[in-house]
Image (cartoon, rainbow, N blue to C red):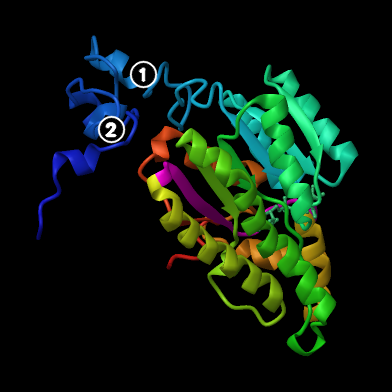
Amino acid sequence: MPTTSRASRCGARPPTRSSSCSRRAPASKPGRGGGQVSRSAPASPGRSERLGAWGPFRGPHVRRPPMELKGQVAIVTGAGRGIGRATALELARLGADIVIAEVDQHNADTTAKLVKDLGRRAAVVHTDVTKRAALATMAERTKAELGRIDILVNNAGIYRAAATLDVTEDHWDAIMDINAKAVFFASQAVLPTMIAQKRGSIVSLASMAGKIGSKTNLPYNASKAAVVSMTKSLALAHAADGIRVNCVCPGFVETDMWTMVARDQSKLLGLTPEEFTRQREKAVPLGRMERPEDVANVIAFLCTERAGYMTGQALSVDGGLVMHG
Ligand SMILES: NC(=O)c1ccc[n+]([C@@H]2O[C@H](COP(=O)([O-])OP(=O)(O)OC[C@H]3O[C@@H](n4cnc5c(N)ncnc54)[C@H](O)[C@@H]3O)[C@@H](O)[C@H]2O)c1
């Protein structure tokens, strides 16, 4: 049986009360091997147990270094509600100023207020992501109003269900325009600025749907598979420019979109929306529906230097629903 090295056993894990690694780990530099464990040699075992990676240990998660994204500017499309709003707020908590690129002015204004309440700058740029000219304006106004573009989160998306024989051309085009085409042209709109800065991070919302098939969601699944594919091509094309491109693949996230999923799918399956949701929830290995914040946390991580060696990846954030690819 191969032996497990001490580094791989203790690696990036924060100390916990039961962790023997935390008690015995020597002091090491942050970012190298077990360096996330502590910044200096623990004064005593008791103290090492209380310290997380960046300060006092206050719960099951490592405290993140504060303001990792300070001075950076992030555009989040569809940030008026759901995963987009949660992402805008998480990036703002990490120090980024936020551009909310939305069609829903009222919701966009609310997100902007919440970002400002966190002490960050916020700008609402009315953007229909299906229009290439609007995406160009989004990039220009971001530079004009906030000075730079470090992060793009391609979040705006729509959902529609239909049996294969009922999918119309309008259905296909509407899904592809927002979920796939807009991801490419929004990225294209910000790339010249990121290339000039020699730095940038693009994170797009794919879905577990992009990794599996579906009897009743064919265009949606195809659009999300396209996001995974574009992520890989963009990552390859712009790695040398200092730009990282990744996507996340959530599962069943409780947002307004999920209300539509449950309504449409339950009709096709002869269930009530509540029955459909309960059925789906039971299928999740981690045993609960996903929250927008579950996705936002991973998106924010991908935007930080902690993910500085990751590009071209499609990360499942789905409670264990999809465990391949
Ligand atoms: N909710 C889920 O279960 C789930 C699962 C996997 C992936 N996703 C993906 O995550 C993303 C966000 O999903 P959500 O659940 O937060 O959706 P949501 O419907 O709650 O929010 C979507 C937001 O996008 C905005 N939007 C729609 N069309 C737009 C357009 N043309 N231009 C600009 N903004 C537009 C809407 O106004 C809204 O604020 C989507 O890409 C979705 O496909 C969601």
Residue 45 % position (x, y)? 24, 17
Mark found first going from the N terminus, 1 or 2: 2
Residue 255 is covered by the magenta coloring: yes
Instruction: Say which residue appears at 68% left-offset and 68% top-offset.
Output: 279
Amino acid type, label 2: Ser
Instruction: Farthest residue to the bottom: give it.
Output: 165
Query: At which x and y percent is residue 138?
Result: 74, 41
Q: What is the x, y in percent for residue 13?
A: 32, 36
- Marks 1 and 2, Cα distance to the nearest angstrom? 12 Å
Q: Nearer the viewer, residue 316 or 115?
A: 115
Q: Are marks 1 and 2 in contact (CB under 8 Å)?
A: no
**Label 1 CB-ligand 1 distance < 8 A:** no
Where does the image place residue 139, in percent across and percent down from the top left?
A: 69, 40
Q: Magenta part of the protein: which range?
A: 241-256
Left or right: 58, with 107 as reference point: left
Q: Is residue 8 above or below residue 210?
A: above
Rendered-image quadrant of the C terminus? bottom left
Q: Which mark is residue 19?
A: 2
Residue on which the image places disc 1: 51
